Image (cartoon, rainbow, N blue to C red):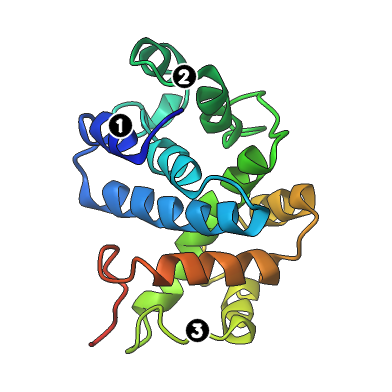
Amino acid sequence: MLTLQRAKELNDSVVTEEHLRIHALNVMAAMGAMADHFGEDREHWEAVGYLHDYDYQQYPEEHLQHTKEPLLAAGVPEEDVRAILSHGYDICTDVKPETNMEKSLYAVDELTGIIQAYARMRPEGIHNIKVSSFMKKFKDKRFAAKCDRALIRKGCEMLGMEVRDAAAICIRGMEDHAVEIGLNGEQ
């Protein structure tokens, strides 16, 4: 099973851009909270979340096309590589999310971007975010416009969840890592 330490070693060996490192941490935190929600292994899900954009910095135009072989060669279990590939379903891969881990990764990848953008504009950062307030930002297509809301909705539908419920879980998970991901606000 992929450990968080191993995921960080692998990812940090190829990802040097700060915004991509922060994104990896955001997704890691959200995936840990989703694991808790589903009664799964938190560290394992965090590890997959942290490693999910392994090839993005080097191959942004060929994202996930340079992931499978290097990760398998590095000893990452096939099911974890499959989960990573599935977050690009219908975008850059044909690997359909099937497990709760895969569906969660598919949904939270973009969702964390909107949460991060909202938290950064608040003096208190990610702390005390009301889901109802977040949902107003989510519905505003001009806010964090690059985050694909249709993809988030599709991922949540796969999970049988409302966006607001997935967002509440992710916010809670990201709040636990507020200092590490730079969302502690003006504390």
Circle 1: residue type:
Arg
Above or below, 81 against 88 in this view is above
Task: Identify the residue shown where x is 60% and y is 47%.
Answer: 40
Label 3 secondary element: loop
> x, y percentage for residue 143?
51, 72
Above or below, 31 against 16 in this view is below
Drawn side of residue 131 relative to residue 121, left or right: right
Above or below, 155 against 96 in this view is below
Task: Identify the residue shown where x is 57% and y is 34%.
Answer: 88
Quadrant of image for the C terminus? bottom left
Find disc 3 in the rendering and name its residue: 129
Drawn side of residue 54 relative to residue 30, left or right: left
| Neighbourhood count class around disc 2 (C-alpha, 10 Å): few under 14, some 14–19, many 20 upward | some
Q: CA–CA distance between discs 3 and 2?
A: 36 Å
Residue 86, image quadrant: top right
Find disc 1 in the rendering and name its residue: 6
Tag 2 or tag 1, which sits nearer the N-term? 1
Find disc 2 in the rendering and name its residue: 65
